[in-house]
Image: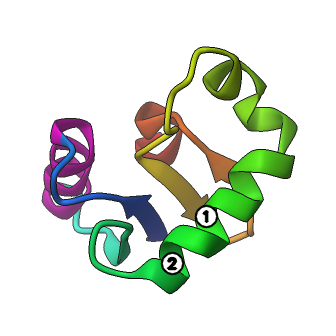
Amino acid sequence: MKVTVIGSHLCPDTLYALNRLSAAKAEIEFKNLSASLSDLKAYLAQRDSNPLYAGIRANGGIGIPCFVLEDGRTTLDLDEVLG
């Protein structure tokens, strides 16, 4: 399984997800929003226009970690990725 994880090394939920995915032997591409302004800008553009994040935006959340699967689907649910 190959997955892109969008998050931050400062976020405990992101670190937890990375550890779970690593234990599941997933091929991980990590986009660390705390280390890359270009990745942060791209993520914010996606988050601001994608209905998946409506609840996140309404509550003032960031919406990380976010997962992009091999087929291009985006999810915020780690169990969906691992399933």
**Is-magenta flag for residue 4?**
no
Q: Name the image quarter holding the N terminus.
A: bottom left
* Image side of residue 55 versus residue 2, left or right: right
Compared with residue 38, is residue 68 higher up or lower down, i.e. above or below? above
Tag 1 secondary structure: helix
- Give the numbered dot on residue 39: 2
- Give the numbered dot on residue 43: 1
Kind of residue at disc 2? Asp
Asked if marks 2 and 1 touch (Cβ < 8 Å), the reply is: yes
Residues in magenta? 12-23
Disc 2: CA contacts within 10 A as few (<14), some (14-19) or many (>=20): some
* Position of residue 17 measured from the top left corner of the image (x, y, whole percent): 26, 46
Q: Measuring 28% from the left and 77% from the top, which residue is drawn there?
A: 35
Depth check: give the residue in front, 26 or 75: 75
Q: Measuring 21% from the left and 44% from the top, which residue is drawn there?
A: 11
Compared with residue 77, is residue 45 higher up or lower down, i.e. above or below? below
* Image side of residue 8 versus residue 81, left or right: left
